[in-house]
Image (tube, rainbow, N blue to C red):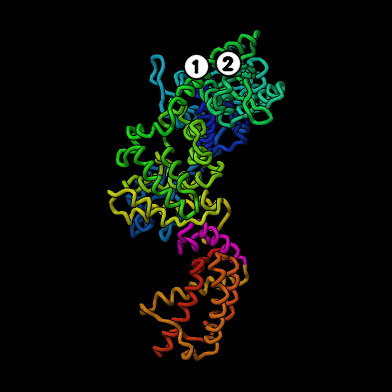
Amino acid sequence: MSNRDLLIEIGTEELPPKALLSLSESLRDEFAAQLKKATLPHGAIEVFATPRRLALLIHDLPDRQADRSLEKLGPALQAAFNADGSASKAAEGFAKSCGVTVAELQQKQDGKVTKLIHVSQQAGDTTVNLVPTMVKDALAALPIAKRMRWGSTRDEFVRPVHWVVLLYGTEVIKTTIMGVQTSAETRGHRFHHPANIHLNSPDFYLRLLRGQGKVIASFDERRAEVRKQVEEQALNLGAHAEIDEALLDEVTSLVEWPVALTGRFDESFLAVPQEALISAMKGHQKCFHLLAADKSILPYFITLSNLASRDPAQVIAGNEKVIRPRLADAAFFYSQDKKQTLASRTEKLKTVVFQQELGTVYEKSQRVKVLALHIAVQLQADPGLVARAAELGKCDLMTSMVYEFAELQGIMGYHYATHDGEPAEVAQALNEQYMPRFAGDELPTTVTGLVVALAERLDTITGMFGIGQPPTGSKDPFALRRAALGVLRIIIEKQLPLNLVACVDIAAANFPNMKNGAQTRAAVLDFIFERLRALYADKGVNTDVFMAVDAVRPTSPLLFDARITAVSHFIKLPAAQSLAAANKRVSNILQKSDQTNIGIVDNVLLQESAERALANSLQQVISQVEPLLAAHRYTEALASMASLQVHIDAFFEQVMVNTEDEGLRLNRLALLSSLRQLFLRVADISLLQNV
């Protein structure tokens, strides 16, 4: 058995740039799954992707499968032989189906039953025979939303297929894939080298494509080359190129031979907010913008050409000609929008539906205002600024700029509010209401922005749950999960002492027609607090720690976080395991007790020295931790409670709780109940069994 490298290349029309990376990675994963299914071991799998090709290079692939032993179970011995020892019809039929005699069959224990078995050797198939079907199955399994047909064939793929390379070592695996006969002929750059390039073996693939074909097949290598060229172009101007990673991926997916070129636009466009200019350059023209040392935008852009032109000045001029109308549109929209104040657009919000059952955007703004004013009281924010920000929050949706560039919502609200002379904090809040926009994004910096951002998200979450449209496993059209994470990040990272339960109650009350209000509020709180599980898992917090705190469900995420920190510290203490087990035991005893009203501890009924010691220590610890709990110093409180371990252990070793004397039993249950309630003021540490 020998090993060779296998090259698979699917040559196509230009592939959709935003799907190129996912398609190439899926092809790798699907073909790797096919190799595993065929029990073909292999070395590394290299992935290549350009606008016109998806390719895999599988190293050290054996030329055939290993031989396999096949076992076929037959009837049990009891049914296989008659009383006189002769073979039964069942045994003979089984032997015949296997092509052997009964005497050639073996026996094998199958559970508690011994059965006849036929063992045969199956020779492994050759890799050359297996690969065509594996490639076809891998291509069929790719996540392609819309497949297309071309020509007169019924083959379907994301784009028409023009050539297919299937080269195993020096051998071409002959087959037809997507209506195309396989070969060892790849193709170079559409303009620099449109002719075929013959491959003698997979080893020459990258070298020939780059040197002769003017194609950089490796996505990562091409991406690095684009970044390098863009940074060099910026350096030539003494500027900084702002490289958006998503745009970098998209541009890399558009070119096979990247050539960065710098263009210029009229400085008069700099009067337009730079976010609008950047959006026009990135979104429409796929260009990188340049910043000065003070972070202000410069009148330049860097574009990527897919060829090395003999007259780059003409290419630059063409790009400048195309980008000018886009920037002119942005300038026109900005000029026209400023002719009306944001406040004057409030009435237009009544014509835009937020959600069919939740009313218009205007109605949503009014709900956000009510909730924001409630939050403002808790956070001691200026109610006038908060109310104004809530009223104007969605008005920029009615501007031409945001209609054309939807990603500028909030940002343009800030600029227009500033132009209208609104208070600076109100203007800032119009943008900050959308923060954080994505995972890891910055949070609002103004108190007004924090308040409106929280109110906006809580209104949406509560409303959608109220109409029975929570997110499902695959669908979350209103981004409720992201909204919940935003609420939690704002409260915890900004250390806001906010009662989330009260906020959700106000949010629900803003929907007078909401059915099952109590159930909705509970579902919303469960949904939001459940997002904390993922946040803490990312930080390495043990699941049991989360469950212990969630069992007592603090009203504030900030207090939830403080308890997580405290319990995470507590589990490192020597007494933690013993106290967790003791709390579990106490919980079980109290649950099994048929007493619904246990009462308080009567010191007169404390007979055993161990129970007296525990009662005295418990009272001392309670007096110590009361001020700590009031100040939310949970770590110190749990550390103080840990001193009870010795007395708790002694109590369970020396004292019988369920004594026949009812007075003593109830008193001991009261003592344990007091102990249990003390720990529950921080967390249910009885759940810390796996830390």
Identity of the residue drawn at 54% across and 30% down: 21
Quote the CA–CA distance across marks 2 and 1: 10 Å
User: Is residue 567 visible to us here?
Assistant: yes
Give the label on residue 187, or none.
Answer: 2
Dot 2: few (<14), some (14–19), or many (≥20) neighbours within 10 Å? Answer: many
* Residue 373 x, y percent position in the rendering: 43, 49
The magenta segment is: 545-572
- Is residue 86 visible in this depiction of the protein? no
Q: Secondary structure at mark 1?
A: strand
Instruction: Give coordinates of residue 367: x percent, y percent.
Output: 37, 45
Locate the N terminus and report the quarter of the image it occupies. Answer: top right
Which image quadrant is residue 47 in?
top right
Residue occupying image coordinates x 33% and y 35%: 350
Answer above or below: position of 434 versus 488.
above
**Residue under numbered circle 1:** 162
Q: Label 1: how many residues lie within 10 Å, few (<14), some (14-19) or many (20+)?
A: some
Q: Reading the chain from its start, which is encountered first: label 2 or label 1?
A: 1
**Location of residue 666 by image quarter:** bottom left
